[in-house]
Image (cartoon, helix red, strand yellow):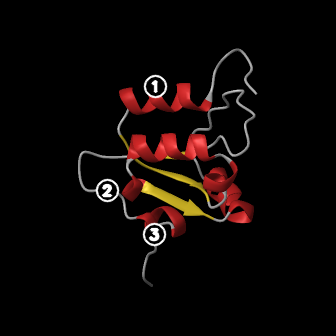
Amino acid sequence: MLINGTSFHDIVVTLVEVGDFESAIVTDVMEDLNSKDYQFITELMGKDHIHEIPYIPDYYQMRDRCKAVVQTGDYGVHAQAILVAGYPSADIPYEWLQDGLKKDG
């Protein structure tokens, strides 16, 4: 369902075109429950740049650590992804995103 005509697809395409995003994090059930959007994000970012994590509680915990949340009005089942902003250097290791940076001692 869309409100004001803004979809997951519309927002993600726009952000990726104008920003520097290196990967996306999606729920481990998105492919089964929303294959259309899963295929879209996978084709856009590349399969090697899609990280699947358990929906509850992991996805919500990761979402809570995000710097910005964009609500599109798209209430499609699992029509959501966490976009990982990149740098002009090598990709950010997924473990850093999942666990944060650890300091010894």
What is the x, y in percent for residue 15?
Answer: 45, 30
Q: Which residue lies furthest to the top in this view?
A: 4
Three-letter amino acid code at the position of disc 2: Asp
Q: Residue 91 has which mark? A: 2
What is the x, y in percent for residue 51?
Answer: 49, 59
Occupied quadrant, residue 28: bottom right
**Residue 73 visible in the displayed image:** yes
What residue lies at 24% left-to-right and 45% top-to-bottom? Answer: 88
Q: Name the residue under label 3.
A: 95
Three-letter amino acid code at the position of disc 1: Thr
Can you say whether 32 is above or below 35 in the image? below
For disc 3, the neighbor class at 10 Å (few under 14, some 14 to 19, many from 20) is few
Q: Which of marks 1 and 3 is in front?
A: 1
For disc 1, the neighbor class at 10 Å (few under 14, some 14 to 19, many from 20) is few
Three-letter amino acid code at the position of disc 3: Glu
Sequence-wise first label, 1 or 3? 1
Q: Which of marks 2 and 1 is in front?
A: 1
Say which element carries label 2: loop
Sequence-wise first label, 2 or 1? 1
Occupied quadrant, residue 57: bottom right
Occupied quadrant, residue 69: top right
Quadrant the C terminus occupies: bottom left
What is the x, y in percent for residue 9?
Answer: 55, 30
**Residue 81 visible in the displayed image:** no
Horizontally, residue 17 falls left or right of residue 1, namely left
Say which element carries label 1: helix
Quadrant the N terminus occupies: top right
Q: Residue 14 has which mark? A: 1
From mark 2 to mark 1, how far is it between C-alphas? 21 Å
> Looking at the image, which is closer to me, 12 or 63?
12
Q: Residue 80 has which mark? A: none
What is the x, y in percent for residue 37?
Answer: 58, 40
